[in-house]
Amino acid sequence: MKNRLKFTLSFLSLLPVPWACAEGPVYAAGFGSAQWLVEGSVFECSITQKIPNYGEAVFYRQAGEAVIFYLQAIESEMAAGQALLSSVPPSWRQGLPQQDIAYVEVSRSRRPVSLDATHTRVVMAELFKGMMPTVTRKAWYSDDRSIRVAVSPVNFQGAYENYQDCVLDLLPANFGQLERSSVFWRSGQLALDDAGRQLLDNMIAYLRADPSVYSIQINGFTDTAGSSGDNLESSRLRAFEVHNYLVSHGVNEAMLETRYFGETEDYLIVRNERTAADRDRNRRVTLLLRRN
C-alpha cells in the first residue's frame, strides 16, 4: 500500500442540498453529489464526506486507537448543549421509521460534534443499512430554529472496504502512545517479559516508519527495597536490557541515551513505599522519544 492512499467514489450529478424545512436548514449531500474520500497512511486512516454549505463528516482512526466520527463545520450554527443523533430514512426509502439513537454533546467550535467509539460504530452500522445518521440541534442565534446535519449512505460500503484496506496497514501504536513509555519489572526480574517485549516491538515498528525520531532516552529506576548498591546495579542491567533489545532489532545505537539511577529519591513515583504496589510503580525503565 502506498504511503498516501486516496479513493474518491463519485456518482451521477444532481443538485446538492441543504434544503429548507419548517424548523430550519437541513445540510446533506444530494444523492448524485455524495462522495466519499478515503485517505490513509501507516499512521492514520479516514473516510470523509463533504456536506455542501456545511463542512465535512469524518470517520477517523489513528494508529493504536479506535475509530471516531466527527463533524467539521465551516461555521458552526449549533448551540452548545445536547443534540439528538437519529437514523433517518433517505428520500428514496420513505416509509421506514426514523429511530432516535442517543443525545450527544455539541460544542461551539469548528468541530461541534465528536462521537466516542461506541456511537461511531452505531453511525457506521446505520450507513450500512442505507440510513442517514442525522444530528439535530437548535441554532445558537435562535431558540425557534433547528439545524440538522445528515450523512448520506450512498455507496458507503465501497468506501468502507477501501478504509479497511488502510486499517490493515496501520502501525500498532501512535507517537502519543509511545512518546513517554515505561517497562515495569517484577521484584528480582532482570529479563524482559512478554509485556515489555510487546511494548518495545510496537516502538520498533513505529521507529521504522517515522524517520523524524532522532533520540530515545532510556532511564532505569528501582524501588527502595534492598541495598542502594544492588538497586543501582539492577537499574543498570534493566536499562541495558532494553537498550540491547532495541539495538538487536535494528535501532541505531547512536540514537540511544541510556542512564540508570537505582533508588534515587528524586525519581521515585511513590516516595514513601508502603505496599508491594507502591514498589511495583517505582521499579521501571522509562523511554522518552524525541522527534524533529
Image (cartoon, rainbow, N blue to C red):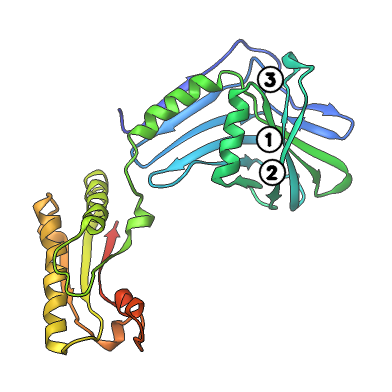
34 on left or right of 254: right
Q: How many marks?
A: 3
The image quarter in which residue 19 lies:
top right
The answer to whether 3 is drawn above or below residue 218 in the figure is above
The image quarter in which residue 168 lies:
top left
| Residue pointed to by mark 3 | 30
Residue, far front: 276
Q: Rounded to the nearest whole Å, what is the CA distance between mark 2 and mark 1? A: 7 Å
The answer to whether 257 is drawn above or below residue 208 in the figure is below
The residue closer to the viewer here, 186 or 282, is 186
| Residue pointed to by mark 1 | 54
- For badge 2, the amino acid type reads Glu
The answer to whether 215 is drawn above or below residue 68 in the figure is below
Residue at 81% x, 45% y: name it: 139
Residue 119 at x, y percent in the picture: 60, 42
Residue at 16% x, 82% y: name it: 231
Residue at 69% x, 50% y: name it: 105
- Residue 27: numbered disc: none
- Residue 75: numbered disc: 2
Assign the N terminus to one quadrant of the image. top left
- For badge 3, the amino acid type reads Gly
